[in-house]
Image (cartoon, rainbow, N blue to C red):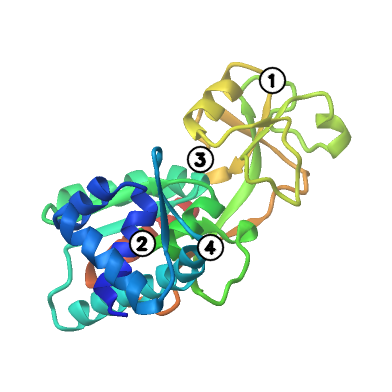
Amino acid sequence: MDIRKLRHIVALSQERHFGLAADRLGVTQSALTRSIQAAEAEIGLRLFDRGRDGVYPTRAGEALLADAVPLLRQMANLERNMALLSGRGSGEVCCGFGPLAAALLLETMLSHVARDHGGLRVRTKLGDVGELQALLQEGELDFAVLAHVLVEDRPDLSFRRIGRTRLGALVRRGHPLAGRTVGEEDIAGYPIIGGTGGSPIYAPTISCDNFEIAGLVTLASDAVWITAEALADDRYALIHGLPVAQPLELVVASLARRTLSVQALLLIDLIVAALRHRSA
């Protein structure tokens, strides 16, 4: 079975409708129907059931899709790598950021792009580790910047350590604990704000991945915000002595067999420089 038929089968399974799948593929509905019928005749199995509410894969279709989807991803990756090596690669970079990485680095990276690299097209996606790893696997992202403590090592992904930032406990200026050295028992009565990804170091009572909102809540209350010390400005004070105060490694994750473009490597260099500046 050729790649074209596999693409038709996958598109139909995702759209659940011949007309929608044909539009997506840029072919006529009759041509798509003939392609699916030819594939079914070739393997001697019915791949789709047709009903009033759409088109659904049969058990044979599901089995074929389990192999076809990763195969097509590998083909797309191969075509992309060859295009990059021949100088025909796209000038667009798609990159993902975990919440902490975005709060620390995204504004600086995009400011450099807007000021110095106006011809570069950049798409960004913010999400949690699981969501970004799935997008990497699907080929939707060139790379993602993540907190290493939340990442599981995977053979299909490559991880490059790019530096560290220091976690700390931030409170508003004027907070009863501001500037003090305290123990865990001292913060027991205060709300703890942290990310939804969780951590082996602390258990937040308020989980929030929107760092702007988390900061505003900290300033408007007696909450203790567990975050990167580099995010503190003159509105905040640190409290000391808690086990959260330790370095956190950041990594760039990408597909293990994917060649990063010159443009993607440029963005990673900007990210590394921004992290060094924030951690200085």
**Labels 3 & 4 near each other (Cβ < 8 A):** no
- Numbered tag placed on residue 59 in the rendering: 4
- Numbered tag placed on residue 222 in the rendering: 1
Label 2, label 1: how far apart the Cα atoms are = 53 Å
Question: The residue under label 4 is which amino acid type?
Answer: Arg
Question: The residue under label 3 is which amino acid type?
Answer: Leu
Of 20 and 74, which appears nearest the observer? 20
Label 1: element kind? loop
Label 2, label 3: how far apart the Cα atoms are = 45 Å
**Mark 2 or mark 3, whichever is nearer to me:** 2
Question: The residue under label 2 is which amino acid type?
Answer: Val
Label 2: element kind? helix
Q: Inspect this view and state whether residue 239 appears.
A: yes
Q: Residue at x 75, y 49 (%)?
A: 201
Of marks 2 and 4, which one's residue comes earlier in the chain?
Answer: 2
Label 1, label 4: how far apart the Cα atoms are = 56 Å
Residue 218, position in %: x, y?
60, 24
Label 3: element kind? helix
Q: Residue furthest top?
A: 220
Q: Residue at x 60, y 41 (%)?
A: 227
Residue 48 is left or right of residue 260, and the answer is: right
Residue 273, position in %: x, y?
37, 61
Label 1, label 3: how far apart the Cα atoms are = 18 Å
- Numbered tag placed on residue 38 in the rendering: none
Q: Quadrant of the N terminus?
A: bottom left
Of marks 2 and 1, which one's residue comes earlier in the chain?
Answer: 2
Of marks 1 and 3, which one's residue comes earlier in the chain?
Answer: 1
**Mark 2 or mark 1, whichever is nearer to me:** 2
Label 4: element kind? helix
Of marks 2 and 3, which one's residue comes earlier in the chain?
Answer: 2
For disc 3, the marked residue is 231
